């Protein structure tokens, strides 16, 4: 069945679109694609920095639109508002439901105000605690009353863990417009595979079938604690290969260009310490296949979203997942020793947990199976979309 005229038109607004996907923007793209796959007319709107990307394109059934933006200096940014604000107005006008992903979107306040004036349903989702949670927003420009009113005017505040919910309630004073849920995973792409399929994937991806495959997914940044992972892996005498899937070499146009030097340093450090036991794939579209071909997932970040996309996707694939004990990762949805393994982040503890999983595969399998079951039951896009539809009053077609 194709999209029908009586289905709600949905707009997602995020900081980036592929190929420049950061964590929150990646989830916006994935969730928007999922809903578009349900035959809803969905558009993902972002900014087109210096016109480097196409103004409009499609990713399957999802429409992608980008507004021209020049970010060279203050004057060019100011000039860009003459393009951005009318663009926002147009896309809000032609859609029924607006999902805003993050408080770092330029002029996101305008989207909320225009959306409510035009009678649209506006859903706002913070991305990083301490940056764009409700308390951080109201204190950002010392305009507490304005941002408090802005939060009150939204149709729904999408909180991805109790820390955001508490921040929202401290600012707004009630929870009548609060929707709390993890951000979700597309379980049609991320799911456990049988041994035979894992072997086939390893052949396809050129991964040695006889090695334990340890994997991390994400940008090569110091805040992700890679140096301790490198050191821990260097102390393991069991045959393994470590895959890092994500950008590690970037151009001067990349949005992470201020981190270009640290990326290069981490790359050199990994190669020096681990040699041919580390493989950098770069950014890949088939992340699900790399996860499904692996044995252990590890994330050692000092700071992340709540919980990160990469953890949720690894869990959905049934991998035993080792993460550093940071707020928002252990304790909400993810549970120590039930659906993931929590480390202190120190070299000795990372080494201990990896070794335990390798030497006791039954333990890793139990953790992985529990993780995949929890994702399917509580955190699939299907489950979350049904809950959101109920809160937004969307009637099934």
Image: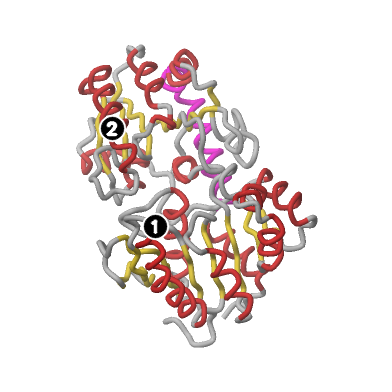
Q: Residue furthest front?
A: 75
Kindly report the distance in space between the C-alpha atoms of the residues bearing marks 2 and 1: 25 Å
Q: Residue at x 65, y 71 (%)?
A: 392
SS for dot 1: helix
Task: Answer few, some or many: residues within 10 Å of disc 2's Cα (few below 14, many 20 plus, some between 14 and 19).
Answer: few
Q: List the residue tagged with mark 1.
A: 74
Residue 194, percent from left and from top: 38, 42
Q: Residue furthest right?
A: 173
Q: Nearer the viewer, residue 28 or 362?
A: 28
Residue 154 vs 318, above or below: the answer is below
Which residues are drawn in magenta? Answer: 355-379
Q: Is residue 371 magenta?
A: yes
Q: Residue at x 36, y 39 (%)?
A: 219
Q: List the residue tagged with mark 2.
A: 261
Image quadrant for the C terminus?
bottom right
In this picture, residue 253 sits left or right of residue 104: left
Q: Nearer the viewer, residue 182 or 154?
A: 154
SS for dot 2: helix
Residue 348 vs 20, above or below: the answer is above
Residue 266, percent from left and from top: 30, 27
Residue 123 vs 210, above or below: the answer is below
Q: Earlier in the sequence, mark 2 or mark 1?
A: 1
């Amino acid at each position: 069945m194709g999209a029908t005229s009586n289905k709600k038109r949905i707009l997602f607004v995020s900081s980036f679109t592929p190929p420049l996907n950061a964590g929150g923007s990646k989830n916006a793209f994935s969730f928007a694609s999922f809903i578009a796959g349900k035959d809803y007319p969905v558009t993902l709107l972002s900014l087109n920095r210096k016109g480097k990307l196409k103004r409009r394109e499609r990713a399957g059934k999802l429409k992608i639109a980008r507004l021209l933006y020049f970010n060279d200096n203050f004057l060019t940014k100011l000039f860009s508002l003459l393009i951005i604000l009318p663009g926002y107005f147009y896309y809000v006008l032609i859609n029924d439901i607006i999902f805003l992903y993050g408080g770092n979107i330029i002029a996101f306040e305008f989207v909320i105000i225009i959306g409510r004036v035009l009678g649209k349903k506006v859903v706002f989702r913070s991305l990083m605690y301490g940056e764009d949670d409700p308390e951080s927003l109201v204190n950002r420009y010392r305009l507490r009353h304005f941002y408090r009113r802005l939060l009150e005017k939204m149709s729904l505040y999408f909180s991805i863990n109790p820390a955001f919910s508490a921040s929202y309630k401290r600012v707004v004073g009630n929870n009548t417009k609060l929707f709390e849920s993890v951000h979700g995973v597309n379980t049609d792409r991320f799911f456990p595979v049988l041994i035979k399929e894992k072997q086939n994937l390893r052949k396809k991806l050129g991964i040695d079938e006889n090695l334990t495959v340890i994997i991390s997914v994400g940008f090569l940044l110091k805040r992700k604690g890679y140096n301790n992972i490198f050191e821990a892996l260097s102390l393991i005498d069991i045959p393994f290969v470590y895959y890092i899937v994500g950008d590690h070499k970037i151009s001067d146009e990349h949005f992470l260009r201020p981190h270009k030097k640290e990326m290069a340093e981490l790359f050199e450090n990994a190669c020096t310490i681990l040699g041919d036991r580390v493989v950098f794939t770069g950014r890949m579209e088939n992340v699900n296949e790399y996860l499904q071909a692996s044995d252990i997932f590890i994330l050692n970040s000092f700071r992340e979203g709540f919980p990160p996309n990469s953890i949720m996707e690894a869990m959905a694939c049934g991998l035993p997942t080792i993460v550093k004990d940071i707020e928002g990762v252990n304790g909400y949805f993810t549970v120590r020793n039930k659906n993931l393994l929590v480390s202190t982040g120190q070299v000795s503890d990372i080494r201990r947990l990896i070794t335990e999983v390798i030497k006791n595969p039954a333990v890793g399998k139990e953790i992985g199976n529990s993780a995949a079951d929890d994702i399917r039951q509580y955190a699939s896009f299907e489950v979350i979309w049904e809950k959101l539809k109920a809160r937004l009053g969307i009637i099934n077609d």
